[in-house]
Image: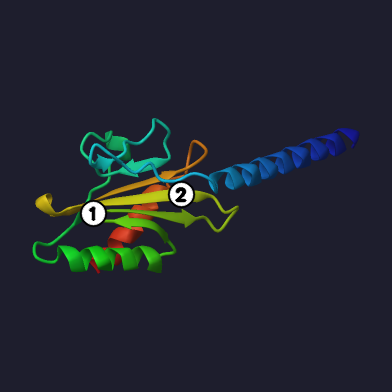
Amino acid sequence: MKLLSILGIAVGGALITVVVLLVVKAHQSKSGEAPGLVAGHLAPCSPKPNCVCSEAGTPPDKLVAPLPLPEGQADADWQRFQQVIRDQGGELKQVQGDYLAATFTSQLFGFVDDFEARRDVANGVIHLRSASRVGTSDLGANRVRVEQLRQGYTH
């Protein structure tokens, strides 16, 4: 009986520690900003499994397809895409020419993720990058976000 009490206290203490760690990490994620363009392209993903990107050279496990940008509709579609981001809970932080940066905040703990897009009119696409600011794994949240934005944009 005493062993069960000790085990219960240990498990409870471990859970409290995990929750406190998550709250601290979520607070840390509130500072910072998207990396921006690097040589005219979205920044590459770090080795951590918490980022996806559509730019050439992205490793296959982090690669997502860019969005189509129909010829002759580049400006209207770029504006529509910004509205899709807002409709899905994103907060636009910067829109400058063919680049935009937004943040998405998770409902649980309030983790902030950076979302970036680069309009590539010459190739008829919008390149995408979504990454967590802190931690290692995002449990697939950034890939899901990109696919939800894709659905909102293409429908």
Image quadrant in which the C terminus is located: bottom left
Residue 78 versus residue 134 in the image, above or below: below
* Position of residue 69 in the picture relative to residue 89 (left or right): left
Q: Amino acid at mark 2?
A: Asp
The quarter of the displayed image where residue 103 is located: bottom left
Quadrant of the frame with the N terminus: top right
Whole-angstrom CA distance, mark 2 to mark 1, is: 20 Å
In percent of width and height, residue 23 lies at 64, 46
Q: Nearer the viewer, residue 24 or 93?
A: 93
Q: Residue at x 61, y 47 (%)?
A: 27
Question: Farthest residue toward the top?
Answer: 47
Q: Residue at x 77, y 42 (%)?
A: 12
**Which secondary structure, mark 2?**
strand
Vertical placement of 106 versus 34: above or below?
Answer: below
What residue does disc 1 label? 98
Tag shown at residue 113: 2
- From this viewpoint, which residue is outermost toward the right? 2
Q: Residue at x 81, y 40 (%)?
A: 8
